[in-house]
Amino acid sequence: MRPRNPHEPHRAASTLELFFDLVFVVAVSIASVQLHHALTHGDVLHGVVTFAIVFFAIWWAWMNFTWFATSFDTDDWLYRVLTILQMGGVLILAAGIQPMFEHADFRVSIAGYVVMRLAMVTQWLRASRSAGAARRATLIYAGGIACVQVLWLLSLLLPAALSPAAIVVLIGLEIAVPVIAERTGHTPWHPHHITERYGLFTLIVLGESLLASANAIIEALHETDDLAPLIGIAALTLVTTAALWWIYFWPPHHHAIGGLRASIFYGYGHYFVFAAAAAFSAGIEVEIDTLTDASELHEPWAAFTYTVPVAVFVLGVWLLAIRRYADAVVNVVVPVGALLILIDPLLPLPIAMTAVILIVIVAVLVWRPPVEPPSPAH
């Protein structure tokens, strides 16, 4: 398992990576559904916090596999088996999402998470045998991940009152492992491959919005005969989702991957982009529930469940990928547009206003193409 060439031409996502992503469709979908249920019942704080924790586990497992694969993907039988084992861990984690939301029961999800992470420990140990200059980094990855997994299992023995603090500490430790490892020995990541993988995951979470909208409308048809508002929401959801896709893929993402600091900023910052896209689908379902009097959230608060995720998505993409490659006009229109979307619920017709603002942002991006990128940040 020798390191891959970070300058390998025509490097693209493998069929195994695409297969791997399929299980995350399941996990993201279940997390979004549970967030929708929590918001609909007015349990906003608990729902948002639990969703943030669940989505961290989903995103972190996906991201760690992705960055490992860009450096050491050999696609032999053992690599494939260990990857499929991680997929099994994702499915176990997904099975534990509902108990996390309903009973604050983390046991099943932590078990699935540990399965995923221990499979990665095996991958890192295998890579360390032929990693060359990156050997020390691979061993730190393996040792660090293994130690944190032991702590996750031990956290199940803590009293319920201490669980929130333990989760915060353990998440901090998980985040620290790659930073420490990469400072001791750089692993060779491929900018085009990494950003393609991030783009593919973005498509997954945006697709959840379309699926959620369709499912919610199908259910709402049994509750009301007034189709006009439902058709309007469906159309505006499609416009909004398409605009988010357009905004995300406007800048040259591969230029954002440079030195350690820039790569960490890009990689970690995508948590907010991905989580916002997944939460947007729950917000659309809440809005449909509001129309059919099936939600305890009422306007304008219900509208915030989709305007906040949209605003976070747009602002996140601007900070991570657009800002450095845009002119002054784009760098004013995009963040100001995100802030206007954030306060949309205080205005009449918030869904329509959100779509209009996004259309304006897209029109500006078409008018003002990306500028020549500066040298990579370090």
Image (cartoon, rainbow, N blue to C red):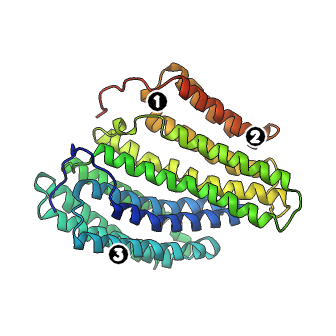
How far apart marks 3 and 1 lie (CA) works out to: 39 Å
- The residue depicted at 51 percent of the width and 47 percent of the height is 273
Q: Residue at x 24, y 50 (%)?
A: 182
In depth, the one of 183 and 203 nearer the eye is 203
Task: Residue 229 in the image: state x and y as whole percent.
Answer: 83, 51
Q: In this view of the protein, which residue sits in the foreground, 321 or 250?
A: 250
Q: How many labels, in total?
A: 3
Quadrant of the drawing holding the C terminus: top left
Q: Which mark is residue 85?
A: 3
Badge 2 is on which residue?
Answer: 352
The quarter of the displayed image where residue 307 is located: top right
Give the image location of residue 257, x and y in percent.
33, 40
Residue 214 visible to the viewer? yes
Question: Crowding at label 3, few (<14), some or many (≥20) Cα neighbours within 10 Å?
Answer: some
Q: Position of residue 181 (x, y in %)?
A: 24, 54
Amino acid at pointer 1: Arg
User: In the structure shown, which secondary structural element does the residue marked by tag 2 occupy?
Assistant: helix
Q: Nearer the viewer, residue 335 or 217?
A: 217
200 with respect to 38 (left or right): left
Secondary structure at badge 3 equals helix
Task: Say few, some or many: other residues with alpha carbon within 10 Å of mark 2 (under 14 / 14 to 19 / 20 or more).
Answer: some
Sort mark 1 into few (<14), some (14-19) or many (20+) by Cα contacts within 10 Å: some
Q: Earlier in the sequence, mark 3 or mark 1?
A: 3
Residue shown at the point (35%, 75%) measured from the top left:
85
The residue tagged 1 is 323
Q: Is residue 33 above or below residue 309?
A: below
Answer with mark 1 or mark 2, whichever residue precedes in sequence: 1
Residue at disc 1, secondary structure: helix
Q: Seen in the image, is 100 located left or right of residue 288?
A: left
Callout 3 touching callout 1 (CB < 8 Å): no
